[in-house]
Image: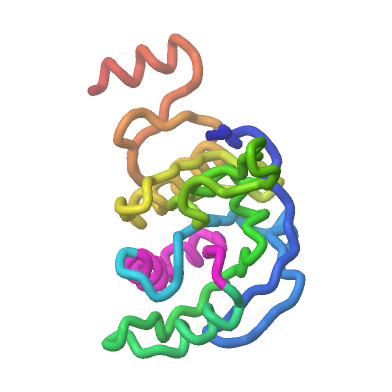
Amino acid sequence: MAVLVGKKAPVFEADAVVNGGEFVEKFSLSQYIGKKHVVFFFYPLDFTFVCPTEILAFQEKLAEFEKRNTAVVGCSIDSKFSHWAWLNTPKNKGGIEGVKFPLVSDLSKTIAENYDVLAGDWEYNEDEDYVEFNGEPVAYRGLFLIDKAGIVRHQVVNDLPLGRSIDEAIRMVDALQFFEENGEVCPANWHKGDEGMKADAEGVAGYLSKH
């Protein structure tokens, strides 16, 4: 599993569905460079069980991300038509109607591969002389916090059965923005409104003396 923290987020252009039902060609995270932080997350498949709980939870907290000038973007290996159908299916029928943030179509699986969250690998079968995929050809539950310069500052990758905490994603946005604004680092279990620490021995000692 690649560690992308500190590196440029892989660039892509792909089909997406935005605003709950509008098709967009050549959607790219580059549109946010210099303007917004981005929470870019992968989920395995449309019309499944854990995935809608995460996506709907992101939508419920979307205003919190927007207050922090942070875009939320989802991605799976489904087609744009599958995304559209799911977005237009009522919640009581297993859909995600009402979700407004973009859902990217990674039908070729190249985005998941470039972010190294594809749940399997292509391997060459020498005996049969062909390439085969070993594993599940879907994305793990990867999440990447990308700053305004397009640099990945935080990542977490969960196995397929394990849903993520949206509150933790918000906390990490707060921590990154606190550091960017104040130049102070965030200690364990830091939350917005808590004190930070200066990144030197004197600052650490001062913080610890108060706690």
**Residue under the image location 75 percent in, 63 percent down:** 13
**146 within the magenta span:** no
* Lateral position of residue 194 relative to residue 29, left or right: left
Q: Which residues are magenta?
A: 51-78
* Lateral position of residue 108 relative to residue 40, left or right: right
**Residue under the image location 66 percent in, 62 percent down:** 108
Which one is nearer the viewer's eye here, 132 or 60? 132
* Residue 191 placement: quadrant: top left
**Residue under the image location 44 percent in, 44 percent down:** 157
Which one is nearer the viewer's eye here, 96 or 39? 96
Residue 62 locus on image (x, y percent): 44, 69
* Above or below, 12 relative to 210: below
Residue 129 locus on image (x, y percent): 70, 43
Q: How is the image coloured?
A: rainbow
* Above or below, 148 relative to 155: below
Report the number of discs: 0
Residue furthest to the front: 127
Which one is nearer the viewer's eye here, 36 or 100? 100
Residue 25 locus on image (x, y percent): 74, 76
Residue furthest to the left: 211
* Above or below, 111 relative to 63: above
* Above or below, 170 relative to 59: above
* Residue 44 placement: quadrant: bottom left
**Residue under the image location 54 percent in, 84 percent down:** 84
Residue furthest to the top: 201
Q: Quadrant of the C terminus?
A: top left
* Lateral position of residue 54 relative to residue 126, left or right: left
